[in-house]
Amino acid sequence: MFVDTVIEDKALHKPVFLIGLSVTVLAIFFAFNFTNTIFGEFLSPVIGNPEESGFFGRLAVSFVLTILFVGNLLLISFARLKIQILIVWLELFILFLAFAYSFDLEIAYIFSGQPSKIGLMISKGLFTTIYISAVSIAIATAIAIVGAIAKLSNNGFAYAIASFYTSLFRGLPLLLQIYLIYMGLPQLGFMIDAIPSGIAALSLCYGAYMTEIFRAGIQSIPKGQWEASRALGFPFGLILRKIILPQSVPIIIPPTGNQFIAMLKDSSLVSVLGIWEIMFLAKKLGAKDFNHLEMLLTAAMIYWVLTIILEMIQARIEKKYQQKT
Amino acid sequence: MSIKLGLKKSSIAFTALLLSIGMTAQAGVVYDYIKNNNELMIATDANWAPFSYINDAGEMEGFDVDVGREIAKRMGVEARFITPDWGVITAGNWNMRWDVSVGSMTPTAGRSEVLNFPAVYYYTPASFAVHTDSPVTTLAGLNGKNICTTASSTWEMYLEGNLDMLNAPAFTYKVTPGTITALADGHTCLDDTRLGAGVRNDGIIDSVPMIQGAIEDGYPIKFLGDPAFYEPLSIATDKGNNDPELDAEIARIIAEMQKDYTLTTLSMKWFKNADGSSNDYTVAY
């Protein structure tokens, strides 16, 4: 991002802002009333029994929470940027954990059994999820390149087929496409099993989205590049391969990375076909002993970790292509 | 490997399609395939303990799974389980992706349009249940209330008053709910009930062993009244690839398993009461 050279005082260090913030936060904490929570118990030496403390207790609890919150912000504001980011991430993560913990769940269930439930999900489900996503991504990319070129061509048939394809597959819910391919194709005599059906649906759907991304990326290259290459006598294929595509790749990469991440998570939809991937195992393993939320949270964590890894890879690739241009 | 298998099956399905132009029933096509392939592909939803579920070792287990294994054994072939969504199984048109459903399916008039029901192998009672703090004490108390159950299940049909079971023991509609909350996953109903009486629903209807399992797992729910009805549960085969020979073979094996008490033994093994006694659900009440 653009680095501003005009440095202003931090808003948090201005008294008016600080007081305004504190009052607002106090009002919010007061409105939500945290008296009967763990915070009220911490303050019980001062306010007595939290349940009988009334208005004073509520105000006291809100006041202490406000001081903690604003003080925390102030302290962080003095740290360096990288430290700030790290602390805020950590605090938000702890809040998330506390939120999940407050569901009153049997967290031990996730690690129970031999092998443990989470071990089962990773050993049986993780590979399937990654395998389905990776194959679908590869096929979707191939479809997208062909589709984008077809959409940009002057050939009426190619354009019509490609635009019909993108319109249809962007226009139907992915879940519906999965059912259509799994149950519809056999009616035509093409018997495909659950995993190939899932891969077909994911590739076709994401191929359609990526076709549009690739098309926009190719179109964003100035017309002059085409004209200059033509003037130099290059044939069409060579221009596309050596001049246009290398320049559009840095434009295509960020939205494509987003599609990869989205597909990893959408692969959970193929669980309806009975494929033993992460989402399927989470639902079924939780059903046995009625610990649904525990297993769903486990699946959530696995997906999140996978996504973070993909985000890191995406950041590296983006950086590499930015240096080149 | 699965693709190869799929192609092989597709050619058979295609042959069956060609042959079926001439005649409606294709004697033996599916059964011959099972024998030649030495494998019985059994579809069962893995969502229902103690009927069929994934155990701690990550393998299929339960009453239906045991029955499926026994059928395959008596056919002289290996059993293989696949776990599609319930809706995909009941939709029919399996195209030989799997050969039979051993998944506690109740034969209804609607389902019999796409599926065959060669043999009923046991009966389970369905019962209403409410939160332990619920003010409702009789089945009549649930009239006009919000009842939760699994979507497109026999329990939902019962609540709607249009349960068209085939060969079922006689029953009466004892409850006329005000609202029916039908969820894709019936387990969610139990979680909703746990939130309190009347929060998201006033009561649920489900199979007795299932509710029993939830109570043993500490859910604050209790049975309400006697079982509402007993539903026959059957093996199902695909009408799209109609194979009278396979149906006859399944009917024969189930009759044999009833005769030598194999089914009774399995029922006693899987369906326990709170006091540790067992239930024989293989006879209709």
Image (cartoon, coloured by chain):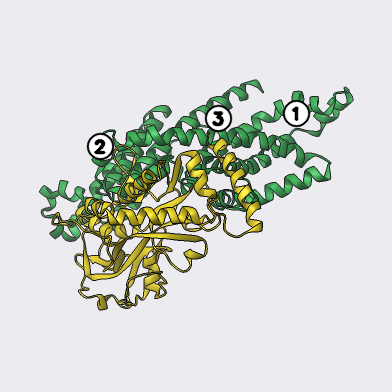
Q: Earlier in the sequence, mark 1 or mark 2?
A: 2
Depicted A259 relative to depicted A5: above or below: below
Judging from the image, mark 3 belongs to the subunit labelled: A
Describe residue A314's horizontal placement relative to residue A300 as left or right: right
Tell me which amino acid carries mark 2: Gly
Describe residue A232's horizontal placement relative to residue B117 as left or right: right
Residue at 42% in and 74% down: B162
Describe residue B188's horizontal placement relative to residue A225 as left or right: left
Dot 2: what SS?
A: loop
Q: Position of residue A230 (x, y in %)?
A: 87, 27
Q: Which residue is mark 3?
A: A3
Dot 1: what SS?
A: helix
Q: Position of residue A18 (x, y in %)?
A: 36, 44
Chain letter tied to yellow: B
Question: Residue A36: in sight, yes or no?
Answer: no
> Which tag is nearer the camera, tag 1 or tag 2?
2
Q: Which residue is mark 2?
A: A113
Judging from the image, mark 2 belongs to the subunit labelled: A
Residue at 47% in and 60% down: B116
Depicted A149 relative to depicted B176: above or below: above
In front: A323, or B63? B63
- Is mark 3 in CB contact (under 8 Å) with mark 2? no
> Which tag is nearer the camera, tag 3 or tag 2?
2
Q: Position of residue A103 (x, y in %)?
A: 27, 49
In front: A235, or B276? B276
Tell me which amino acid carries mark 1: Ile
Q: For marks 1 and 2, give the CA distance.
A: 56 Å
* Residue A36, quarter of the rendered image: bottom left
Say which quadrant the C terminus of chain B sits in. bottom left
Q: Earlier in the sequence, mark 1 or mark 3?
A: 3
- Which disc is residue A244 wearing? 1
